[in-house]
Image (cartoon, rainbow, N blue to C red):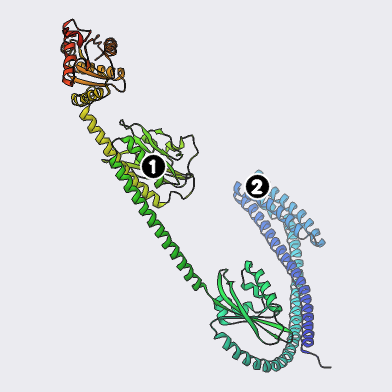
Amino acid sequence: MKWSLKTTIFTGCALAVTILATVSGLSYWNTIRLVKTSQEVSDKHKVISEIQELIYLIEAIKNQQERYIVTADQTYFYSYQEKYTLIQRQLDLIEAITQNNPRHQNRIAVLKSLVNDQIDLIEKSMNLRITEGLEPALIFLQTGENQVVNEKIRQLIEQVQTEENRLLEQRTTAAIATTKNMIVAIVLSSIFAVGLVSLAGFILYQDVKKRRDIEEKLRTSEAQFSGIVDLAQDAIISFNQQQEIILFNRSAEHLFGYFAEEVIGQAFEMLLPPNYQVIYHQNIAEFADSTKTSHRTGKEWGEIQGIRKNGSEFPAEASISKLEVNSQQVFTVMLRDITQKKQAEKVLEETNQKLSGWVGELERYNRDLQQISVMSDLLQACVTVEEAYKVITSSLKRLFPHTSGGVFMMSESRHLVEAVVIWGNPESERLFTPNECWALRRGKRHLVEDINTDLLCQHLTSASVPLPVEYACIPMMAQGEAIGILHLSSQEKGKLFHAQKALAETVAEHIALALGNLKLREKLQLQNIRDPLTGLFNRRYLEESLAREIYCAERKKQTLGIIILDVDHFKQFNDTFGHEAGDLLLQELGLVLQTSIRKSDIACRYGGEEFLLMLPETNLETAQERAELLREEVKHINLHYRRQTLGRISISVGVAIFPEHGLTKDAVIRAADEALYRAKKEGRDRVFVASLLRPEE
């Protein structure tokens, strides 16, 4: 009967396994015996070692006895006692390790008794040395009783040693025999197993040789085909009807990062990302059922996604073809990596988007510049700060349409910052101190893009409204000093992007320059028309205003009241209290005049201690009443200077009316001045009307 290669190999392997199992069993059994024998040998060595230790201790105690008798040194007596304790422990140890040998147990019991007898004789000899001296003790040592006990002990110990040496020799001989048997069994079984394996190898070699010739022919054919496939620049992958890969060319190895040996036999879907596998199965099913012909068919698969060995995905253009042979379908896919093409398209798209963004940003920048230019022109045309605030409000709403904010100006005392322009719903307080804003503290722009991590200004954290998502405070500088801030805020992330922050700084510069110029202009104008001591209008403003008011009164057919007043005994007041007290008096009088007149009235310092009031649309009776009220109110002024009360003051007042007392400003002022002169002449602290000074016509 001729066995097949498979049967031959199986039978040979079964026999080899059986032999190896038998050898292993025998080896295990011999090993157990060897271990047990080795343990017994070790035990015998230990018994012999402990007996030698006992002999040493007995000899040592005898030496201590003789030394003590000869020298009577207590050190040897104490050493003897220690050795006695160790002898007892050693006997117990030998008894414990030989408990499985009954004859040894009997000998040990006798040995313990003899040792105790010897100890008694030793103690007796030591006591003789103490009580009777050296000679009696030496005689006792040489007596027969002591020698008999020593001889019995020696014989017993020799019996134990002889027994243990005999047993040790037996165990050693058994261990050697067991080892030899195990070596023989291993050698014989190994020879038999090698023979079986050699026979199986010879049979296998004959069969392999036959197959090798066939495979060589197939390999030659496949090498020719693989060479053609490997030269292709596109990845070529073939898989069978079960979708197992059967061909993976070199370009596919480069593309996917796998060696062919790693993917052959694996499912084709391993080369596709998970989110594409469902689409792949649908396409394969449709393509497989699309035709039943036995010739080659193919179609463009389009763009698909592949996944490399390292997990990275890539786009590829794919085409698929099918070959049906003997009712088996073989699919071949050709792939071309288009990553660089896609990247180039993406770069081109991003470049176009950037260009579009830059164009839009440039257009927005031009619009902003145009709006800033319009705002600057309007601000240059403003006469008052209030007009400038209106221009700023409308301009900022157009420049920052998606934000809220305001312009905050610093007070003259530089202790407070107050909102003068507001749009939207800014989250800042309307009034705060300069230290509550980081932009004013540092003199530079303060940006907050994340309210959870960035440093917030106190004028926001203390406000009652919710905090913004992001905000910016830009200081407005004029003549090297901060005059306020431009505040921008947004409740949406990203509204205050970089371009708007730069725009805000430009706007803040223009606003600061315009407001600074306006305030400087107002300050210069105020200095030109105001008296620096009293804060009232000066004489120059008086002449301009009086001419205008007389023109208006003449055009409207109305009257204009003129009141001139003078502080009584002012020179005496200055001489008594000093010029600083006089200046204080004039300041207080100026304050009384400012708070006692109407908004349409004009109060001026006419010169020295003289003051003039213009009362538009006021008749003579009303002007006289106002003068009397003013005279009484001045009496209530309480002046204190350097912790000294300066006393009461009084004024003399002259009243005139246009046009009754003159048709020109000079004539009316002269009439009022004459009335003042008459009031001072008649005793001061009184009011005179110009009409009483004129003779009757």
Q: Is residue 316 above or below residue 531?
A: below
Which quarter of the figure is the N terminus placed in? bottom right
Q: Which mark is residue 16?
A: none
| Amino acid on which disc 2 is placed | Arg
Residues packed near mark 1 inside 10 Å, few (<14), some (14 to 19) or many (20 plus): few
Return the residue at label 2.
129
SS for callout 1: helix
Left or right, 368 with respect to 111, comes to left
Front one among 267 and 619: 619
In the rendered structure, which disc, 2 or 1, sits on the residue that comes first in sequence? 2
What percent of the width, then of the height, locates residue 202?
Answer: 72, 91
Q: CA distance from mark 2 to mark 1?
A: 133 Å
* Residue at figure coordinates x 77%, y 67% from the top left: 163
SS for callout 2: helix
The mark closer to the camera, 2 or 1, is 1
Return the residue at label 1.
394
Q: Is residue 470 above or below residue 184?
A: above
